[in-house]
Image: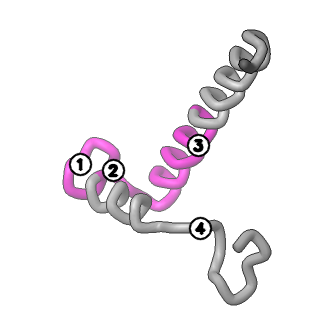
């Protein structure tokens, strides 16, 4: 079994990463002029985010 402190540290790291992703995502929405209070615009942006896969095009990506 993994040590309790390791699991606590991992959870803290994952939660911090999730908060950073949310902040960057909201900042990007704001920069692109998306109104987060508009249901249609928000759903459209979320749909785009969910369709996005990977970090970059397959042709030049070193992660794949």
State yes or no: discs 3 and 4 in contact (Cβ < 8 Å).
no
Residue 23, located in which quarter of the rendered image?
Answer: top right
Q: Is residue 37 magenta?
A: yes
Of callouts 1 and 3, which one flags the residue occurring earlier in the amino acid sequence? 3
Q: Quadrant of the C terminus?
A: bottom right
- Mark 4 crowd level (few <14, some 14–19, many ≥20, 10 Å Cα): few
Q: Which mark is residue 38?
A: 1
3D distance between C-alphas at marks 4 and 2: 26 Å
Overall secondary structure of the magenta section: helix
Q: Secondary structure at mark 3?
A: helix
Of callouts 3 and 2, which one flags the residue occurring earlier in the amino acid sequence? 3
Which stretch did the figure color magenta?
19-42
Q: Which residue is mark 4?
A: 54
Of callouts 4 and 1, which one flags the residue occurring earlier in the amino acid sequence? 1
Q: Position of residue 63 (x, y in %)?
A: 74, 69
Q: Which residue is mark 3?
A: 21
């Amino acid at each position: 079994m993994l040590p309790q402190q390791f699991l606590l540290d991992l959870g803290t790291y994952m939660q911090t990463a999730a908060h950073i992703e949310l902040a960057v995502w909201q900042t990007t929405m704001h920069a692109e002029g998306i109104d987060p209070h508009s249901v249609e615009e928000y759903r459209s942006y979320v749909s785009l985010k969910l369709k996005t896969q990977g970090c970059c095009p397959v042709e030049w990506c070193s992660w794949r």
